[in-house]
Image (tube, rainbow, N blue to C red):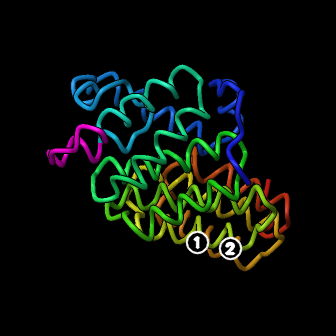
């Protein structure tokens, strides 16, 4: 499926999906404290990986790659997703050895995901994993994206597996609770009690003292009769 053109991506639309909403939340938090870093690459970029990679790796980039990336960043902020896709693709295809290509690849996944083009989104997230992803947080984010695409396409069991593996590999990371909750949710949608209880075991291990994660998961498992209801 090709890129969808002519539609403005608004925050209201994006907030309908947990994964994309989470990306926006993280980005806004980083923007409050790291505006100087964002400005250094030319334009305000609404994607958390910019901070992680550009902030930690001060490697020079080609002028054309910087200009394309900066222009795409402005385009996506202005709601011109179709134009941003063109420039991010040029960064990825013509400047594949740069850090900006890594960012462009990940961001293309985010754009297509927000447009609900889950096949294209999954392609770019998988390309990110294959060609780039080394940072544990970004690796977990890409897997989250893939799992979200699979879930949206109705491939619930496989989605649950991807959520679970992403959480398991970064169990102390800030995304673990959301990932494990999603693993249980997708397993219940399958429905697959084995997958659901496997993810729940990690929820109990990691979040036994965090009711904001534990209790919603338990309620879902009660509803599907995978856990016995609490004794009143």
Residue 211: where, in percent of width, then height? Answer: 57, 47
| Residue 136 location (% of width, % of height) | 35, 61
User: Given the current orientation, which residue lies at the most extreme bottom position?
Assistant: 194
Q: Which residues are magenta?
A: 52-65
Q: Quadrant of residue 111?
A: top right
Residue 62 magenta-highlighted: yes
> What's the mark number on residue 137?
none
On the rendered structure, is 57 left or right of 51? left
Q: Quadrant of residue 150?
A: bottom right
The residue that appears at 49% across and 65% down in the rendered structure is: 127
The correct choice, above or below, for 32 with respect to 107 in the image is: above
Element assignment for label 1: helix
Reply above or below: 200 against 74.
Answer: below
Do callouts 1 and 2 mark residues in contact (Cβ within 8 Å)? yes
Q: Is residue 167 above or below residue 174?
A: below
Disc 1 residue crowd, few under 14, some 14–19, many 20+, Cα 10 Å: few
Location of residue 131 (image quadrant)? bottom left
Q: Which mark is residue 201?
A: 1
Left or right: residue 120 compared with residue 32: right
Q: Is residue 224 left or right of residue 201?
A: right
Could you tell me residue 103's position as x and y percent?
Answer: 38, 48
In reply to whether residue 14 is colored magenta, the answer given is no
5 to the left or right of 32: right
Q: Nearer the viewer, residue 48 or 185?
A: 48
Identify the residue shown where x is 66% and y is 32%.
15
Helix, strand or loop at disc 2?
A: helix
**How many labels were placed on the picture?**
2
Point 34% across, 31% down: residue: 30
Residue matched to label 2: 197
Estimate how packed mark 2 is, as few (under 14), some (14 to 19) or many (20 or more) residues with alpha carbons within 10 Å. some
The CA span between labels 1 and 2 is: 6 Å
Task: Identify the residue at horizontal 29%, vertical 37% (top origin).
Answer: 66
């Amino acid at each position: 499926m090709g890129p969808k053109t002519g539609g403005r991506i608004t925050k209201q639309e994006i907030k309908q999906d947990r994964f994309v909403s989470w990306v926006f939340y993280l980005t806004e938090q980083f923007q409050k404290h790291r505006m100087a870093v964002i400005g250094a690459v030319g334009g305000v970029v609404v994607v958390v990986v910019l901070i992680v990679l550009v902030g930690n790796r001060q490697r020079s980039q080609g002028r054309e790659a910087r200009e394309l990336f900066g222009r795409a960043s402005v385009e996506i902020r202005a709601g011109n997703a179709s134009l941003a896709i063109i420039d991010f693709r040029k960064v990825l295809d013509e400047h594949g050895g740069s850090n900006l290509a890594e960012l462009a690849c990940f961001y293309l996944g985010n754009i297509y995901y927000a447009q609900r083009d889950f096949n294209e989104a999954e392609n770019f997230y998988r390309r990110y994993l294959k060609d780039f992803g080394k940072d544990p947080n970004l690796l977990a984010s890409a897997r989250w994206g893939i799992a979200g695409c699979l879930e949206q396409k109705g491939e619930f069991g496989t989605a649950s597996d991807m959520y679970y593996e992403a959480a398991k590999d970064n169990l102390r990371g800030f995304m673990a609770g959301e990932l494990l909750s999603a693993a249980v949710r997708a397993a219940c949608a399958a429905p697959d009690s084995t997958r659901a209880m496997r993810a729940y075991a990690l929820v109990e291990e990691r979040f036994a003292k965090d009711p904001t994660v534990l209790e919603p998961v338990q309620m879902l498992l009660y509803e599907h009769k995978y856990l016995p209801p609490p004794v009143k």
